[in-house]
Amino acid sequence: MSPDDSELIERCRAGDLTAFEPLVEKYRQRVWRLAYQILRDREEAWDVAQEAFVRAYQSLPAFRRQSAFYTWMFRIVVNLATDRQRQRGARARALGGEPVPEEEWERSVPDPTADPAGLAARAEQREMIRRALDSLPLNYRAIIMLSDVEGLTYREIAEVLKIPMGTVMSRLHNARKRLRGLLGPLLVLILALLAVLVAAAAEAQQVVRFGSRVLLASDAPPPSAQRLAPAPPDERLEAFLPKLRQLFRYKEYTTLERYRAEVPVGTTQRWAVPGDRQLEITPEGVSGTTVRFRVRLSRGNRAEVTTNIQAQSGHPAVIGGPRHGDGVLIIIVWGHPIP
C-alpha cells in the first residue's frame, strides 16, 4: 500500500475526518470511471461512486493491509455497480420495458460548429465499443475493464473480485475469446478504442462552474412585480446592453432571474422560470476554456427552446426565447471549467 495512503488511513482511524478527503480526490476519477464502465449511466455511476466512498469510510476500521487501498476500494465499487445493474435488469423485466439509449432521451439542435464527419466517426466508434462490451456477461465485462482500462495486474484483479488468480486468467481469456468470436480481426481495434471510453469518462469528470440569467426584453419597463427587488446597479448587464439592443432591437432589458451552479459535465440543472416554465442547462463537454451546453426551456410538456451552445466566462452565449408578457425572454449563459 502507498505510504501516503497508509498515513491517511491511520489518521482517519484516529478520528481525523479531513484525512479522507485526499483519498477521495486521489481515486474519485478511477472509482467513477469503473462504475460508469459497468453501468453506462453517468448519474447512476455518480451515485455508486458516492456510496462506495461512504462505505469505504465506514469500513476503514475493518480494512486489513493485505491489499492496496485502491484494490479494496475497487472491490466495493464492482460489488455496488454489479448489484445496481442486476436490480436495473430485474426492474426492466418486471415492467416489460427495454433500456433506452441516452442519445434517445432527448433530441436537440446539433452544434453548428461541430464537424459532421468527425461526430459520425466518433459515434460509430462508441457504438461499436458499446455493442461489443454489452455482448459480454457482467463478470466478463468487469474483468475486461479492470485489465484493459484500469491496467490492474492479475493479482490485483483477483483481490478486487475475490477470485483465484487462475480464475482471473481463464475468465479474461474467455472474455477476449468471446469478443474475438464476435468481432474477428476487429478485436484489436476494439481493445484500442477502449481509450475512447476512458477519454469520455475523464471528460465527464470535469467540473464546470456556470451561470445563467433570464431577461425580459421589451419596449417598455415591465410591471414592478416582474422585477427583482431591490434592483442594484448591474454593471455587467449595462456593459452588455449594446450587444443585446443590436441583436434584439428592444429598448428595455430587465433581469428576471439569476442562477449559478457548479456541477460535473453531464449533470443537468433545472430552475423555475417566470411563466410556469422550466429551464434545463447541461454542460456537455469542455475544450480549453470553452464549455459546450445543452439548453432547454419548456412550458408544461412543450419545449419552447432546445439548442446547443458554447460559452466562456468572458464570452457568454445569448439565446432568444419565447414571448412573455409584452416582450420576449432572453437567456444568457456563461461557463468556466474548473481545473
Image (spheres, rainbow, N blue to C red):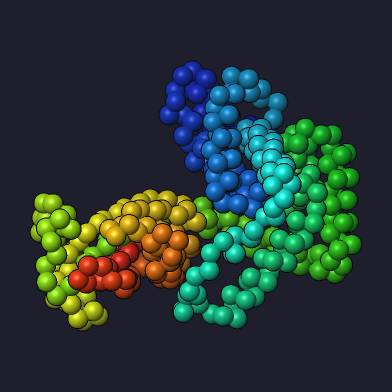
In front of the other: 36 or 165: 36
Give the side of residue 92 with respect to residue 246, left or right: right
Does residue 177 sit above or below 80 in this rendering? Answer: below
- Quadrant in the picture for the N terminus: top right
- Quadrant in the picture for the C terminus: bottom left
Examine the rendering and report whether any part of residue 89 can be seen: no
Give the side of residue 114 with respect to residue 133, left or right: left
In front of the other: 156 or 309: 309
Q: Quadrant of residue 283?
A: bottom left
Does residue 248 sit above or below 299 in this rendering? Answer: below
Residue occupying image coordinates x 52% and y 55% = 204
Residue occupying image coordinates x 22% and y 75% = 244
- Give x and y (percent) for residue 117: 60, 81
Does residue 213 sit above or below 116 in this rendering? Answer: above
Give the side of residue 258 with respect to residue 21, left or right: left
Residue occupying image coordinates x 59% and y 77% = 118
- Give x and y (percent) for residue 83: 69, 38
Count of residue discs: 0
Examine the rendering and report whether any part of residue 304 can be seen: yes
Residue occupying image coordinates x 11% and y 58% = 224
In front of the other: 200 or 324: 324
- Give x and y (percent) for residue 153: 75, 43
Q: Quadrant of residue 201?
A: bottom right
